[in-house]
Amino acid sequence: TKQKLWGGRFTGKTDPLMHEFNQSLKYDRRMYAVDIKGSIAYASSLARVGILTQDEASKITDGLRSVLAEWTNGVFKIQADDEDIHTANERRLSELIGPLGGKLHTGRSRNDQVATDMRLWLLEEARDIEKALKGLVRVMVERADKEKDILLPGYTHLQRGQPIRWSHLLLSHAFSFSSDLQRLQQLVPRISVSPLGCGALAGNPFVVDRDFLSKELGFQSTAENSLWGVGDRDFIVEFLMWSSLAMTHISRMAEDLIIYSTAEFGFVTLSDAYSTGSSIMPQKKNPDSLELLRGKSGRVFGNMAGFLMTLKGLPSTYNKDLQEDKEPLFDAVDTVFASLRIAEGVVATLEVDKMQQALTMDVLATDLADYLVRKGIPFRETHHISGRAVALAESRKCQINELTLEDFMTLNNNFTADIHDVFNFEASVERRESIGGTSRKMVDRQIRVLRDIVSQ
Ligand code: ARG
């Protein structure tokens, strides 16, 4: 009769609903490859301390490689009693190589095993996410480089503020993503810590060489405290926090583009590839891609908040609550990865439309004030004078550039004929030429900085 791996002290059967409740194989099977990788390294460490002969270690390694091949070829047969990926792999190993398979788990616990698997798995995924993030930034930078001529109003409070280059706006979001890239890279040393050899909680009594295990598995360091090694999930919390922030950046960019894609703005048109229609209103083209990007940030934040709640108040070392680390992490990884790729597609394919038409002369009111500043008047006064010019134009139902020199002279006698040179959007943008400004030169500088970051 089939026995659970831990069945020795039990006489009663597991309630079927409890079995289902306890079973994590349905989601942790995606860690099959790193689980086997960890076991192969562990078998070598056992051979090095004489628990396994060289021959036994190579039989176990060969067996594990066959199990791996079964997963990869999609022929691994899950048994009803398999509890998680660790028990499933070990069960299959023993079927293939016999009782020798039972030596593999000597001194090891699923507690150090699962912590090892999660870290190895996340390190691999983080590399893919890093690539996707760089891909997104690259597309934004290339687009910014091509569309430097396009101007639009820059907004504060969603009210028109000052003219800017469209590239400048695009790059502002790219800079958020580039700090996400930096933050992700900074997480890696804290994920890359090997818990293997911590055992159930107290350490490894067969004195396996833990630094050897770390090297074999490509970890940067070895967990110094076994209780911490099996109980720590901060690397998951941190990754979820990272994901929440990265998704927040995606969401804010999406929000800009959603607003800009309305008929009222008409700044951008989404490609059909990233839009959907309405089942009743035939005219509709909805920015569903962007709305999902915005919406999924909530889901990822929820994964972070939920798992942090799971950790809060847990006693030391391993508790089964920790099995709840998987679904939020897996979901966050999948969601972030998909979101980055969709965001890249949306940005690469959208069309820029009527941005320049939205530039009204009032967005040059700051430049008007600056004009008088250059004639020696304190800014606090020139701000007021420019404000009065705006009010005068408003009362005449005209634009400020339609006021005559005489009109301006009634407000202040320092105005001269060159006042009308102020009313030029391109000139306004080009004046912002100190670092970070929206002038062409400074946009080019941003492009260089970002290109440098993503090419590393
Ligand atoms: N499936 C478990 C998890 O994901 C593996 C560790 C089980 N350890 C234990 N002592 N029950 O956390």
Image (cartoon, rainbow, N blue to C red):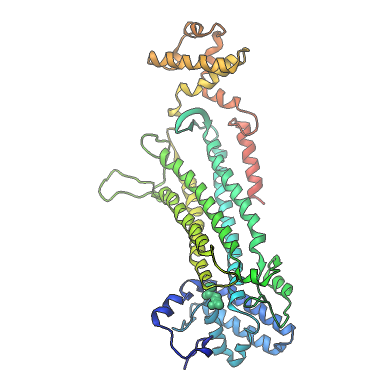
Q: Position of residue 332 (x, y in %)?
A: 50, 60
Say which quarter of the image contains residue 236. Answer: bottom right
Say which quarter of the image contains residue 48. Answer: bottom right
* Residue at left offset 66%, top offset 74%: 196
* Residue at left offset 56%, top offset 78%: 68
Residue 233 visible to the viewer: yes
197 sits to left or right of 243: right
Count of marks placed on residues: 0
23 sits to left or right of 167: left
Q: Position of residue 85 (x, y in %)?
A: 52, 77
* Residue at left offset 44%, top offset 89%: 12
Quadrant of ligand 1 in image:
bottom right
Q: Position of residue 181 (x, y in %)?
A: 61, 51
Q: Nearer the viewer, residue 328 or 258?
A: 328
* Residue at left offset 40%, top offset 83%: 15
Measured along the vertical axis of the image, is residue 225 above or below residue 158?
below
15 sits to left or right of 8: left
Measured along the vertical axis of the image, is residue 254 above or below residue 56?
above
Q: Position of residue 358 (x, y in %)?
A: 43, 29
Q: Nearer the viewer, residue 76 or 282?
A: 76
- The extreme bottom residue here reads 1
Residue 72 visible to the viewer: no
- The extreme left residue here reads 280
324 sits to left or right of 266: right
Q: Nearer the viewer, residue 307 or 164?
A: 307
